């Protein structure tokens, strides 16, 4: 079963690399913010899959919860700042 | 100055999630022994809850719950707890932060006294880190404004 | 193969498929609002299915309860973040993509 999770993890890493295109070449800042939020969600799932592969998932759950929180917070703060400053 | 946003969705979700973030921060502080966590990480998550409040409800309401003066007092209390436990170990006859000597005071075995000593130190660290992060957040987001700006017509 | 393993494999493959379609939408759709639509909905559901798959893999234990907490948090927080971004774009004046503009430009008329 762990080989299956490893293959899924490699597939998600490829998807992260694809999302990086939008995070670097997006025409405006908000495009990049959306790309970073998508990368954050995939990173969270990759963390949990690595925990299952190394059979120590108890350590990785707290970290992934904190990362979900920080991803949400960063996106909301950035969008509020850009809305206030008036440029896309 | 961040004024209160008129966005119902972000305000409602922030109001709903904030108590759970605080409880999770306390869990991270308490479980520093067994899982990744400890004082610094828990303090940062506590401060993150205040940042969420400040961004969604405006800086005025956040100031009513945690002003700069209260943040200064809490950071000093955190350092007092940390240094106080170390000094208490000095008074009881060991080195600085030698938690085993606390077993005479608390009537437990030296191993349990070490565990409780570390827990107390982590709580002090979490309080200090939270207060300093809140102060930094206030300092960054009110740059260049004075209190007279709030009273202007808007 | 026990039933639990089949359920886990189905959920994880479904999550990977949804992640890939959401990424495809993020790359190829023509406008900011449509891209946000793709990533906001697709990523949330894909994360939910992947987390449920991982929770079923561990059975009834504390680990599964914590994974379900993460899933509930993601279900609440990610659409809110998407809403905040799209509201910022609307307030800053980002215009949605319309189809008539392409047709009109082909015919060399100024609108």
Image: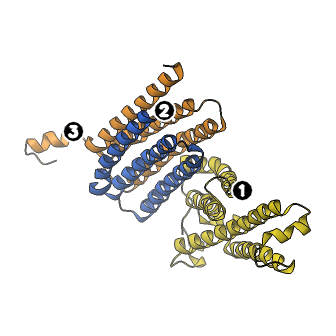
Chain colours: A blue, B yellow, C orange
Separation of residues labelled 2 and 1 (CA atoms): 31 Å
- Residue highlighted by disc 2: C49
Q: Is residue A57 above or below residue C2?
A: below
Separation of residues labelled 3 and 2 (CA atoms): 35 Å
Other residues around mark 3 within 10 Å, as few (<14) / some (14–19) / many (≥20): few
What residue is rendered at 66% in x and 64% in y?
B39
User: Pointer 2 and pointer 1: residues touching (CB < 8 Å)?
Assistant: no
What residue is rendered at 66% in x and 49% in y?
B20
Spot occupied by residue A56 in the image (x, y as percentages of width and height) = 56, 45
User: Pointer 3 and pointer 2: residues touching (CB < 8 Å)?
Assistant: no
- Residue highlighted by disc 1: B30
Given the image, what chain letter belongs to the residue carrying mark 2?
Answer: C
Mark 1, mark 3: which one is toward the viewer?
1
Question: Quarter of the image containing the N terminus of chain B?
Answer: bottom right
Mark 2, mark 1: which one is toward the viewer?
1
Q: Earlier in the sequence, mark 3 or mark 2?
A: 2
Q: Residue C12's quadrant in the figure?
A: top left
Q: Nearer the viewer, residue B64 or C18?
A: C18
Other residues around mark 1 within 10 Å, as few (<14) / some (14–19) / many (≥20): some
Mark 3, mark 2: which one is toward the viewer?
2
Given the image, what chain letter belongs to the residue carrying mark 1?
Answer: B
Camera sees residue C107: yes
Residue C99 disc label? 3
**Element under disc 2:** helix
Given the image, what chain letter belongs to the residue carrying mark 3?
Answer: C
Residue C46 disc label? none
Spot occupied by residue B44 in the image (x, y as percentages of width and height) = 60, 63
Spot occupied by residue B138 in the image (x, y as percentages of width and height) = 58, 71
Question: Quarter of the image containing the C terminus of chain B?
Answer: bottom right
């Amino acid at each position: 079963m762990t080989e299956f999770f490893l293959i899924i993890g490699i597939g998600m890493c490829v998807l992260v690399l694809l999302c990086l295109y939008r995070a670097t070449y997006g025409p405006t800042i908000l495009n990049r913010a959306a790309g970073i939020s998508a990368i954050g969600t995939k990173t969270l799932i990759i963390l949990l899959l690595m925990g299952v592969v190394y059979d120590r998932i108890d350590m990785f759950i707290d970290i992934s919860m904190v990362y979900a929180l920080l991803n949400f917070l960063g996106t909301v703060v950035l969008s509020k700042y850009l809305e206030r400053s008036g440029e896309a | 100055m961040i004024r209160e946003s008129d966005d119902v969705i972000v305000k409602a979700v922030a109001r709903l999630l904030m108590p759970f973030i605080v409880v999770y921060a306390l869990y991270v502080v308490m479980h520093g022994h067994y899982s990744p966590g400890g004082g610094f990480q828990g303090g940062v998550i506590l401060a993150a809850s205040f940042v969420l409040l400040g961004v969604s409800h405006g800086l005025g309401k956040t100031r009513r719950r945690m002003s700069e003066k209260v943040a200064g007092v809490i950071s000093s209390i955190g350092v007092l707890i940390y240094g106080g436990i170390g000094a208490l170990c000095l008074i009881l006859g060991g080195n600085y932060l030698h938690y085993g000597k606390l077993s005479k005071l608390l009537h437990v075995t030296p191993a349990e006294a070490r565990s409780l000593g570390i827990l107390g130190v982590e709580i002090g660290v979490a309080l200090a880190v939270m207060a300093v992060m809140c102060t930094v957040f206030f300092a960054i987001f009110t740059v260049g404004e004075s209190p007279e700006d709030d009273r202007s017509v808007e | 193969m026990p039933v639990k393993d089949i359920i886990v494999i189905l959920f994880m493959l479904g999550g990977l498929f949804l992640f890939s379609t959401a990424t495809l939408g993020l790359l190829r759709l023509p406008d900011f609002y449509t891209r946000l639509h793709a990533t906001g909905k697709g990523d949330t559901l894909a994360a939910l299915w992947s987390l449920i798959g991982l929770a079923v893999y561990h059975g009834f234990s504390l680990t599964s309860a914590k994974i379900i907490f993460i899933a509930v948090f993601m279900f609440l927080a990610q659409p809110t973040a998407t809403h905040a971004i799209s509201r910022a774009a609307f307030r800053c004046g980002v215009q949605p993509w319309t189809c008539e503009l392409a047709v009109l430009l082909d015919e060399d008329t100024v609108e």
